[in-house]
Image: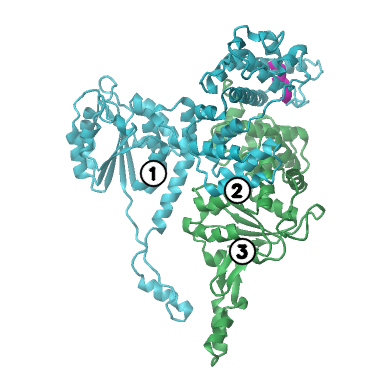
Chain colours: A cyan, B green
Amino acid sequence: MLDLLAGFVAELRANGIPVSLTEHLDAAEALGHVPLEDRQALKYTLGASLVKSSAHWRAYETAFEIYFSTRVPGTGTEGLSADGGGSGDPSAGSTRGGDGQGPGTGSGSGEGMTPTELADLLYKALLGSNDAMMTAVARQAVSRYAGMEAGRPVGGTYYLYRTLRNLDLDTVLDRLIAEARAGASRRLDGAGERLSDRPEDPLPDDPPPFTTLEERLLRDEYQSRIERLRKEIEDEIRRRLVEDRGREALAKSIRKPLPEDIDVMHATRDELVALRKSLRPLSRKLAVRLARKRRHGRRGPLDFRSTVRHSLATGGVPLEPKFRYPRPSKPEILVIADISGSVASFARFTLHLVHAISTQFSKVRSFVFIDGIDEVTSFFDGVDDPADAVQRINTEADVIWVDGHSDYGHALMVFWERWGEEITPRTSVLLLGDARNNYHASQSWVVKAIAGRARHVYWLNPEPESYWDSGDSIVSEYANHCDTVVECRTLRQLERFVGELA
Amino acid sequence: MTVSDPTRGGTGQDETITSGFPVPDEYRFRSIDQVRSGLASVHYLADDGIAGVVYLADHLAKPVLVEGPAGTGKTELAKSVARLTGGRLIRLQCYEGLDESKALYEWNYKKQLLRIQADQGQDWRELEDDIFSEEFLLTRPLLEAIRSTEPVVLLVDEVDRVELETEALLLEILSEYQVSIPELGTVRASRIPLVFLTSNNTRELSEALKRRCLYLHIDYPDLDRERAIIETRVAGISEVLADQVARIVRSIRTLDLKKDPSVSETLDWARTLVLLGVQSVDAERARDTLHILLKYQSDIDRAAKELAGVDETS
């Protein structure tokens, strides 16, 4: 068990979750206090001692499922239709080679179920919210549709996708809703018989009409059941993969970056959602931290008057010296962001973050460009959620000049002509982009001129440093005139940079 | 300011709890299930995670760091555990600027001054021993919890509000259950209290603090648990209504709102509906009372629109 734990801890660390030695020891000690056969208890025990941040919980859960997956006893399919039992012991593991898919149900599940039967079963399971049945369906569906092949080094997502596509849950959902609606109207006709086998019928008895609110609630209910089914299927696939390939290998291929480590430029849609979610708490934290820093940062010179005044309480003895607090000036920020396709999401996150903490700056102005440039500061005025404003930028800003391919040179030149005068020695200028200029003229003298007027000029580049200056990237040409060029690929890097800025 | 809250043993009837006290290998709880049922008996419905962590906290003698969105019952957990174990709840409310003299102990210097003045020609050595004695010590919540001879539950509320440096104050207490007072020596806990720290996650807590604690994240409960919570906490609510409330709240939580409705707001809402004599919620009722559930106008508008089913597609 201790070996297993050590491997597990190593896997967590590989995931980027910081687990200290003490925490490892705690976990080991904790194991002595819980019944090991209770998997749920085990999970929370280890979680409580190893994982100290809710953002890491997902990664932990996945790793836990892999390392402590249950060897499913082959009898899970109680009370199904006659042939259901056959598939209970999916000869899933190693014996199940290529024949799994070809002959389809031939191998494990005996006579097997026809797709319609399976669909029917699925429908019933969802309707009744029956856990055992749901597990059974999941197992059945995986053996039937996933087409898992032993030893193939893919993660679970591929199988998951295949299974789900075949189950076609959207249609099922629609069918459930339609059915419920029909049921309701039937009742409306006074048929009187309660709709059936649904134990927790959400419809109250008295009011007949099937209102939109009720429909919505019903839909949510089914949706959550389907979500549960999805999870079942995922678990099932993972279990089989573990049996097939061993846990270390699987853990490695399943490993996902934590939200703050996701590479913004190459994030998938799901990852973007996760990013957006973690952005809000992040900006809140950052704002709190900066506000504190400002208030408590430094002590000023002795405030003589105040000291004397307070000394009256102690009989004229100045026990507590009082100090003046300096009011450090807040910097003015001017963001110039490339929002062309390749770096758009990065620019959005940065704008969002900068505006979310705009109270920490005396002034924030934002400009976006592709080959034309436009000021978007006003979009953020009076909006309480920067996300809304960022949305508007995409649709309303006037950033196209000729062809909608990035042209840093032209955009910068226009910027200099129209707004260059407004840069003051108090301004910090942030330039955002990958400096991939499509072989246009760089006009890097503009950056030099800006640097001459502004307090600082920073360039944030969302590309990894090794890509800089490859292809049409001319970042170093601009970099000559900037204070620093910062690689900013993840939220963590972005947060650090913005934190230092203020 | 600090409040010590003498809510003592609400329900004395849980006789499985050991009343005499550790001897380190004597635990308050024997099994996770016992924790769960015990908490349920004081009207706190714990899920597996919560019960498990409380059980572990007892067995490993470690503090619990509870995190989660506002209004999910973090503070309530500590109170319930106090009620369950029949211990006194000592609460330290954290705020910016909290310092040693408010959290740990302070010398009562006014009294010390008086003492010095009252007794002029006394030998200094004697006097010094005298004015740094227990008599002149003002105990604050942390020291109080350590010195208490009766069972206590220590709640350090919203620990994320103190500055990073102040956190260090807690470290000695949390890992060793002792407080060092230079003039008096080290005060050790006669019995190890159950300690809960809550955090709203407005900033990262230091590694040192986290390392010493068990971590518990309390999230919004799932449908069944929320319904059960509503039923236990709201007097006189019908099953149908509780079910509806839970469903609607879940539905609202799926929207992308600024602030999701918390459990306590859900309970408030349910109570309101009961007071209004509502038997079952329809869209109109829901819309009229939404302001109890949601606290931002934009959120209210949004939810009202969704509940009225303006767009069928979502």
Percent from the top left, x then y, of residue B242?
73, 35
Q: Could you say where residue A58 lies in the image, as x and y percent from the top left?
A: 56, 35
Q: CA distance from mark 3 to mark 1?
A: 36 Å
Q: Which residue is mark 2?
A: A26
Residue A320 or A98: which is nearer the viewer?
A98
When the figure is inspected, residue A343 is found, relative to residue B149, above or below; the finding is: above
Callout 3: SS: helix
Tally of numbered tags: 3
Verify CB contact (< 8 Å) between mark 2 and mark 1: no
Q: Quadrant of the C terminus of chain B?
A: top right
Tell me where residue A490 sits by quadrant: top left
| Location of mark 1 (residue) | A496
Left or right: A322 with respect to B196? left
Q: Which residues are magenta?
A: A122-132
Q: Is residue A216 left or right of residue A488?
A: right
Q: Can you give x and y, in whole percent of width and height, for residue A336 in the image?
A: 30, 35
| Chain for disc number 2 | A
Q: CA distance from mark 2 to mark 3?
A: 27 Å
